[in-house]
Image (tube, rainbow, N blue to C red):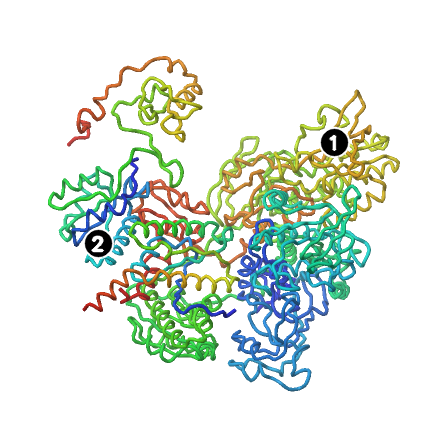
Amino acid sequence: MRLSYPTNIRIIKVPCTGRVAPIHIMRALEKGADGVFVAGCLEGDCHYQTGNLRAKKRVAYVQEILKSIGFEPERVAMYNLSAGMGPRFAEITMEMVEKIRLLGPNPIRLKGERKEKAA
Amino acid sequence: MEMRKGNSVGSVMVVGGGIAGIQAALDLANSGFYVYMVEKTSGIGGVMAQLDKTFPTNDCSMCILSPKLVELGRHLNIRLMTLSELEALEGEAGDFTATVRERPRYVDMEKCIACGMCAEKCPRKVDNEFNQGLDRRKAAYVKYPQTVPLKYAIDEENCIYFEKGKCRACEKFCPAEAVDFSQKETTHKIQVGSVILAPGSRTYDPKAYDYGYGLYPDVVTSIEFERVLSATGPSEGHLVRPSDHQPPRKIAWLQCVGSRDLQRNSHGYCSGVCCMYAVKEAIVAKEHSAEPLDTAIFFMDLRSYGKDFEKYYNRARDEHGVRFIRSRIHTVSPSIENGGLLIGYTRENGEPAEEQFDMVVLSTGMEVPPETAALARKLGVALNHYNFAATNAFAPVSTSRPGVYTCGLFQGPKDIPFSVAEASAAACAAAIDLAEARGTCVQVKELPAELDLSEEEPRIGVFVCNCGINIGSVVNVREVTEYAAGLPNVVVTHENLFTCSQDTQEKIKQVIQEYRLNRVVVAACSPRTHEPLFQETMRSCGLNKYLFEMANIRDQDAWVHQKEPERATEKAKDLVRMAVARASLLKPVVERPLEIRQKGLVIGGGVAGLNAALNLAKQGFEAVVIEKEEELGGLALRIPHTIEGLDVRDYLHRLIAEVRGNGNIEVLTGAELSGFKGYKGNFTSEVRTRDNQVHIIEHGVTIVASGAVEYRPKEFLYGGHPGVMTQLDLGAFIHDRASEAAGWNRAVFIQCVGSRNDENPNCSRICCQGAVKHAIALKDLNPDMDVIVLYRDMRMYGLLEDYYSTARSRGVLFSRYSRLQPPEVAGNGAGLYVTFTDHVLDRPVRVSADAVILAAATIAADTERLATQLKIPRNTDGFFIEAHAKLRPVDFSSEGIYLCGTAHGPKLITESISQAMAAASRAGSFLASRDQTIGGVVARVDQSLCAACLVCVRNCPYGVPFINDDGVSEINEALCQGCGICASECPAKAIQLAHYADDQIMIKVDALLKGVV
Amino acid sequence: MIMAKAKPMDEIINEIKGFRKVLIAGCNGCVTVCEAGGMKEVELLASALRMFFMREGQEMEIGETSLTRQCDPEYNRELQESIRNYDAVVSLACGAGVQFLAEMYDNVPILPGVDTCFIGVTEEPGVWTERCQACGQCLLASTGGICPIARCSKRMANGPCGGSANGKCEVNKEIACGWQLIYDRLKQLGQLDRFEQPVDIKNWSTSRDGGPRKIIKEVSRQ
């Protein structure tokens, strides 16, 4: 299946979303990513039983942290889909990219650009 | 290579690449036998690949199947022969010569890169069988995207070139020159020791019914409906009806289409799975539907007889609102209005009724296709009257021809877990025949010792693939390669046309040696399919396979950004930069071979335990059976005959004698497990016998066969009147006091006593069968006896249905009662009276009875202590929980521990035997395995940082971490599954997962976003 | 163990915004166990603060560390060298740790990053509840092992108040009445007679009214 999806997505492979720690998501945003989503197996279908459920909790935790520093929590999201759901993946990326487009660039990046312009 | 030892050949042929064949092949190949897998179509996966979800867990079918497909496809000791059929089998058990006819694929599998160009360019469209003809495929095609081998095929019957002598578009456009029209049919003569037949079944064609199938597009079969629901199906998982692609609002399922029916070319047996899949489809359809969806299942008896099935049925009805209507449908006709379908039926009280639906799903049964029956005849394998393989209840996987075994649907109707267990059982039988030839036909890879690179700076080689034109036509591969050359630690780069080709592997080896590379990055297709190949190449140069990193520039770049080549090239550079950055932090990860004690401990000396021990011993392993009673035999001691009329006591005597006489088996009776420690391959058990002797047993595997017990009814005067007895009591009574029983005027059976109620919501599976068996036995004793069976649903699944028909034809009266109006039993001195509501008359009826026989539930034995000792889980009913309800039916999630018999859930003797053989196969496979390693991607605790907070202990899904004697967390590398949950949770950051440490993950983020802020 | 929870982010931001270089110092003791102040939380707080100040366009360097325990001088001494590089420290230890660190480094502001809440237990993963208020005179022997000081909202020492209804406290219907628990437990132990015996007037001088407390165990002194 080769449905096209936006080119501005980069995937980082982990053995299970259970390995995705809050700091990984925070680090991506801190380094300037506009958004991060965690793509795990369908709930109940985790190969490691509970990895995706832990990831879901952690994504919610990161959202709380973002709120506390005045960043939009919508910049991070958790999605569940199976390896056979190519169309769904394309749909998710489009949904996410659209959401981020509406939010605008990561505020820290905007600041950097403004600084450049000022200089 | 020495191909044999003694008289047998150490290889097995498995016919059929469905889930049963796959399981049998993997079990055998993993335990020292070479396997030829013969599959008729172009790819394996069978019917399971077509299913959307599986009951009763609603697991995604493809998600759970696909790892098995990949494992089989990559197995060094399985030769996968697709488009092939077994034609003839000469010779005898242990030494057969099989003739296999292989049809041409017209695609060179060595060269095909599965890019799909042939299909894209092929001008001929035909019905897509995988989607049941609901959409179209090309004549150059791949069966489905996850199939194995993932190689295209040209369908000769539909190819324009074969029709008209010209076209060859596929050949012209194939970038890998893989299309080869010169291929010819070939015939192979193959020597094998055993054969396993797992050819599966097909769906009954429902055109003979007045249900409008073939006339009205919105009448579909259940397998068609699976494709409609599936994300890979014709509507990509959107629930739409075929006629107008609009979402339906009302769907009906009609049960028993082609089953439990002797008319219309139909079959007398129950297909065993349709009730459950209909319930599942109704639930899933509701979930898929944006608007509320009304679902109704029209059925005769709802047969949710499996483990946890009844709860699933209850949830469907009570929580999802699926309607269940007890009626056999006579016709489906089009409705005058809005294209709906009208179902005419008869209510239970005899009133006619009609209801309109948008879509009708026919729950079609399964049948043996004529070509399978023809194959069986050719091979000299006897069939039963329904064309299933004829087998014996005590040898459920043996066919009439010695050395030829069977499993899955060809053996009889059954669901996936029982097919999988039976497949392992067949593998066990084959392995026993060939025990002395184990290891004689397999290939073992010799590898050089790994180099010590710990002191070296990273030296990275980057290989960028064009994948023919798959990548190269979108991504500027030259530019990416040049870019890679400038990245830190990169010492050499190469651009390849096909990085995966055999000659490129040789080239990579040369480059590794010439440039003394200690890390390799390949930018190409996908690690999912190709990582192991490149890792093998590295390994053959003495490099640890974990020093490899792949940048996915095809599946995640070129293929999905075809219209934006510049952005795709930029993305490819990012992906390569990220991979190189990560590669520089990769460390060798050590995997050490696991030493395995070649002995099994079997807990329980009933039919299951004895069979497990015997089958383990016959494979050549030692076994110790422990039984808590003084006598072996378990619950089966109380069962004189099977429903087929086989003598259980005689069988048990022979079985016990064989176990006691086997030099590999030690039997300890009056024995209980008093201590258990260790891990897979290395368990130490302490067993205490009644004479207070302590036995220390060191073993590599454990099989739990601790059995179940009959519920002691509190209802229906049980224990208060001698005429009220359980089915087990009756069995003994008929056996011991036949003439007394023959004198009875009337016997009344009451079903579901202690099952399917609030206390025990599950069905006990075997009691309908028990009632029918005893009802026929009573009729045999005295044909004039009135025999009444009061039931809720007669669950005579599979071929048992025949006995239900027999009982009715012998005059046994079956009367249904509802849970809300159970029968009442009253005693009056010696007399017994039963009052029940006749569901047709809807009036109470009172009869006298000489005996009232209660279908007492089969309930879990008290295994609380055992569960704690072995750390194995039990469900709320007290039965042990297998590792996976579908595909690992006899494994526990803790490796090295297996499960069989009624400890898993109620089941028939023949099913227990099958499961016991399966457990012995899985256990034997583990004991014989040379590939078991410890280490690899596992979590490690830096104990100096550990705060002993217990977070890892509480979060590990496998219960592996524990606080050790030093008061800090310890993770046994042999038990860790490598999910990384603990590493991400540890509040002290004391845990890291090998190969996925925080720095190894975050350096990708850093490399990607370098310079952004 | 001592239980704490993260301070509201704006409080922390407010305290440190005047500095340029701030060290976040976790503690590997109690606050790690209650997942409020271990190295994991240090990393997350540091990352969040960096993001905040980056967006504000304010230069802010944030360091990360975690000490074995901040209530022992030897461990706190580990910061001796590195602390010179910072204008301030946010300690994620309990209140004791924050103060002890401050006593050692008296020319660097040591700011609290958590709110220290109570002495309690891990009831289930992620749920911590209070069990002890460190009153200095343990009554548990006479109350069936359930503390009326920590578990009764009103610290009643001699039986429930009139506000106990259906086993719940009038302060909050979610809270079990401490005295109901004590009664049930004594009943279970067959010690209901203890319920009848009044306890002496509680000597609160062992608690807070005597100022900061001190324990001396002579044998342990050097």
Residue A102 seen anywhere in this rendered image of the structure: yes
Residue B649 relative to residue B662: left or right: right
Q: Chain of mark 1?
A: B
Please tell me in which quadrant of the rendered image residue B760 appears.
top right
Pick the residue in front: C66 or B439.
C66
Pick the residue in front: B91 or B163.
B163
Q: Name the residue at 35% across, 40% down.
A: B965
Relative to B241, does residue B821 appear above or below in the rendering?
above
Q: Quadrant of the N terminus of chain B?
A: bottom right
Please tell me in which quadrant of the rendered image residue B233 appears.
bottom right
Q: Amino acid at mark 2?
A: Ile
Q: Of helix, strand and loop, which one carries label 1?
A: loop
Circle on res. C62: 2
Q: Can marks 1 and 2 be said to lie on one chain?
A: no
Residue A113 relative to residue B338: left or right: left
Q: Position of residue C214 (x, y in %)?
A: 18, 28
> Separation of disc 1 and disc 2 at Cα?
77 Å
* Residue marked by disc 1: B823
Q: Amino acid at mark 1?
A: Pro
Q: Of helix, strand and loop, which one carries label 2?
A: strand
Q: Residues within 10 Å of mark 1 (few under 14, many from 20)?
A: many
Q: Name the residue at 64% across, 69% down.
A: B128
